[in-house]
Amino acid sequence: MNELAFLDATAQAELVRLGEVQPRELVEAAIRRIEQLNPRLNAVVTPMFDDAIARASDSLPEGPFTGVPFVLKDLTAEQAGVRYTEGSAFLADNVSTHDQELVLRQRRAGLVVVGKTNAPEFGILPTTEPRLFGATHNPWDVGRTPGGSSGGTAAAVASGMVPMGHANDGGGSIRIPASCCGLFGLKPTRGRNPLGPSTGDVLNGLSCEHAITRTVRDSAALLDATAGPDVGDPYWAPAPARPYRDEVGSEPGRLRIAVTTTAATEAPVHEDCVRAVRETARLCEELGHEVFEFTPRDVDGSALTDAFLVLYVSGVAASVAGWALQTGRTPTEANFEPLTWAMRELGSSRSPADYLLAIAHLQRFSRQVGGWFTGFDVWLMPVLAEPPLPLGAFDAPPDQPLLPLLRAGAWVPFTPIANITGQPAMSVPLHWNRDGLPVGSQFVGRYGDEATLFRLAAQLEQARPWAGRRPPISA
């Protein structure tokens, strides 16, 4: 069963369809792997083993992933009767009373949830080190971060606990951990997957839902199973021309690919991250694509960062206030991590006018980016400004609680672009540095055009396969 650990979800589901493996066998094997690996990685924080075995032993829906074990990130992915904390001590004993629509769709696809994965408090930081549960460790180097905020899911998938898992992305939280853990991570177009019923909009459309996977075909097939608007959704993504699974292996044609290795915020970019992009660009050229250098003009990186932060700190303030209303408890500074409380205070000091002006600024930037895409098909850039950082890199002295936010801005200057514009973007694991750490390359596609990204990703995956690479801590 450990050999099955590194088969992707599509292959595991095929074994179930052929009757060569029973769903319960897959689930019990995943549970054993979690019990074996989790003491070193701390990826799964809420086991759901009894429920998973019961579901796998019963009649499962017939879907693309019937019987395949799966994990839910402990942020937005609610399942009735299961602890739901958003990584916060304020919600340590909170239990969900309903299922999120996305979770229902994942279960209808035949997936069996075996546990909830670790996330930073309210998903704020690009690392996974919440005070409530402690740090998740990167399977490639346990002294380094797996990224965030979907770091628990990334560590679980990279180590072979499960073949894929739920993740979400409000500033890079799918792509960052995918890059740090050597996995494929696609952030879909805004509105592609539902956010309800708990949420209709997260940070004016910055956040979206999907997964971290080992293979491109798993990501495409899962998006086929979950995509589409729910009743009352505020955003709808354009419908695809055909199933995304059909794009995998289809010829992408000769794409015009713009390449950028400098950050609009002027944050320095590590040579490993530049090298990863350059090698990816060369591979694209070898595959017949037109590749050219692109330096965005007339972008005020400082103003863009300020507007983005207004939304983020306002969102934290709203999260704290919302949970106070829902739980009937008064939040105090002691209930939250210092960064969270400092952001809550800062967000509470912002006016409605500040918030609306920030949205207007980000929407102007979105139109600007849309204009750039009239000249190319795909935009290639780093995922991160540095390789995976050591755990503790986002710690702060008591008198500087906002310091981790500044460190995050320096490390993550590229991924928020696609959250601002709503465009699909992906981290593709094509490079490992001299220390053996994965360094992803990011591609951004046109709004609504995941199809081109899936075609390109599958072509890159075939040219330079990555799924067989196993980290030191693995099944």
Image (spheres, rainbow, N blue to C red):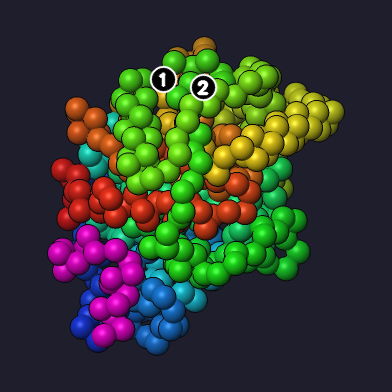
Depth check, front residue: 340 or 73: 73
Q: Is residue 398 above or below residue 376?
A: above
Depth check, front residue: 144 or 62: 62
Tell me, for residue 269, which label it has, or none: 1
- Residue 362 appears at what percent x and percent y? 71, 32
Q: Secondary structure at mark 2?
A: loop
Q: Is residue 256 visible?
A: yes
* Proximity of marks 2 and 1: CB atoms separated by less than 8 Å: yes
- Residue 311 appears at what percent x and percent y? 68, 33
- Position of 134 with respect to 349 (left or right) is left
Placement of the N terminus among the 4 image quadrants: bottom left
- Residue 157 appears at what percent x and percent y? 31, 53
Depth check, front residue: 96 or 206: 206
Magenta-drawn segment: 1-18
Residue 334 figure quarter: top right
Residue at x 36% of width, y 20% of height: 270
Q: Amino acid at mark 1?
A: Val
Circle 2 is placed at which residue position? Answer: 263
Q: Is residue 8 above or below residue 135?
A: below
- Position of 168 with respect to 463 (left or right) is right
Q: Amino acid at mark 2?
A: Ala
